[in-house]
Amino acid sequence: MLAWKSVSVSRMGQEIFSDISLEIGQGKIVSLVGPSGCGKTTLLMIAAGLIDADSGSLECDFRNPAMVFQEPRLLPWKRAGDNMAFGLAARGQRRADFQHRIGALAVTLGLDLRDLDKYPHELSGGMRQRVALGRALVIEPDLLLLDEPFSALDVGLRQELQDLMVRQISDRGLTAVFITHDLIEAARISDVIVVMDRHPRGIVYQHQMSGTPGCRAERDIFNEVGDLLAVPVVARAFGAQDTDRL
Amino acid sequence: MIGVIKGIAVYFWSVWGALVGLFLFVTLWETGHAVYGDFILPAPADAFARLVGFIRDGSAISAASDTAIRAIGGFAVSGLIGSLVGVMAGLSMTAARAVRPVVTVLLGIPPIAWIVLALLWFGPTGMTPMFTVIVTSIPITFAGAVEGTRTLDRELEDMARIFRASRLRIFVDVHLPHILSYLFPAWITALGMAWKVAVMAELLATSDGIGARMATARVNLDTAATMAWIVAVVGLLLAVEYLVLEPLKRRTETWRRRPAGQGSSAQMRRM
């Protein structure tokens, strides 16, 4: 279980959010959606242990968290394979022990084995994000933190990587927290959608999706997003023009 | 293995390109000689012949080794001090603020002023050029180290921390390569300057080394010998840069370079 308990954070005298509580159950994929600046990323950073809350506490039963960011954040001076192995090497594992695992995972993620010998600048954006996903999955995490991992990719590629990720999450029985500003994306791949807003600050709505992530029909997804946007607090969080666009 | 051979071949091919530029320069020199005559600008062949003469009688080797010890020794000291202090200054904003004006002042003082000071302090010894090299190149290596450290990528560091990298690993794998990519150009600039400053200081301060030989040649109005010594200095500089620093830089920065021929196509491929 991962739980934020009445967590408050402020930076440079400005409150980012206060008194937020959220609990994420074992094996669930939870999406945090909302306008930028509502504190989604900060919430994730607290879970990752990169930011300390000013007050409140974090309860985390997971021992092995991994994270994928909006940018791949690969080390430009390391080959793709070594980048994927970063987490394993940091845990003191020897190259010979994980070499095979890296190769196998790379193939699953749609990478060519030759790509592992390339430097990040020689790979396309989609390839780099696959490597970043591989770096997170290869340490066999129990909790996956995803900060808009696909928002920089074009539509077709985004969907392919979403499916790939949802499959990996369900195959491994992972718990995942997924940040996005795209309700459709959230509805496609998560069990629970948590809507955050700036005014009022914090979590304004939680929605339990029906069906299984990654197995929903497109029409059901659109229907459910439509229903969700009919809720006044959700509509306000996404703004009138966003509702029109959707 | 094949990669290594290919790497060497590519390297020598790039040296070949540099040689073309060098020959063009010699051609210009020859033209200058044809126009102005022996006294103003002796023919390249004469200068090289003189240099060969100096090499034969051993004076070139001893002069060059004196100068090299001063230039490279001074460069090594300034590289070490400048880089270390620069990294420390880059890590702390306060230290950076405190040291920056000092560096600006140091950069503003012309090398010739340092030579005068060093002459007063050390007299006509080898320490004078060495000291001058150290103080003139420290600001360069320092500035490189500060810039490299200040531009460290916090996002990469966050990533490394999430994957539970130790502080040592974060430094070696995340910070050091970045800092080095700033330090190498600074080191190369500093080394180039070290030779020039060492020769200049020798010319005014010492009785040995290439600079002192040039002073003698000037007294004797021996332009060919002067040119010969200039060629010797430049040759030494090129040798150190292309045989030591440049290959080292290539080795440590393969991640910046695209392998010949496949770079852009690999980048163009969508996924």
Image (tube, rainbow, N blue to C red):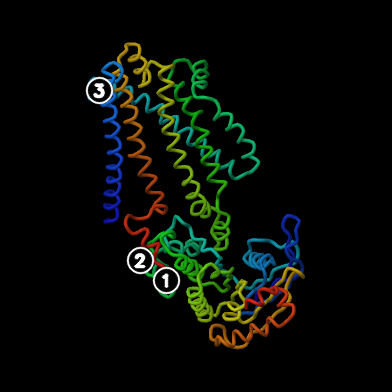
Q: Which quadrant: the C terminus of chain B?
A: bottom left
Q: Quadrant of residue A239?
A: bottom right
Q: Amino acid at mark 1?
A: Ala
From the image, state whether disc 1 or disc 3 is nearer to you: 3
| Residue at image mark 1 | A106
- Secondary element at tag 2: helix
Q: Residue at x 51, y 40 (%)?
A: B144
Residue located 62% across and 78% down the image: A246
Q: Secondary structure at mark 3?
A: helix
Report the chain holding disc 3: B
Taking depth in this image into account, of B171 and A94 the one nearest to the observer is B171
Q: Is residue B16 above or below residue A188?
A: above
Sequence order check, earlier mark of 2 and 1 = 1
**Disc 2 packing (10 Å; few <14; some 14–19; many ≥20):** few
Residue B34's mark? 3
Alpha carbons under labels 3 and 2: distance apart: 58 Å
Picture residue at 37% right of the left edge, 68% below the top: A113
Find residue A233 and report its image quarter. Answer: bottom right
The location of residue B145, given as percent across then percent down, is: 52, 41
Classed neighbour count for the residue bearing mark 3: other residues with Cα under 10 Å, few (<14), some (14–19), many (≥20): few
Q: Is residue B261 left or right of residue A136?
A: left
- In this figure, which residue is indicated by the disc labeled 2? A114
Q: Secondary structure at mark 1?
A: helix
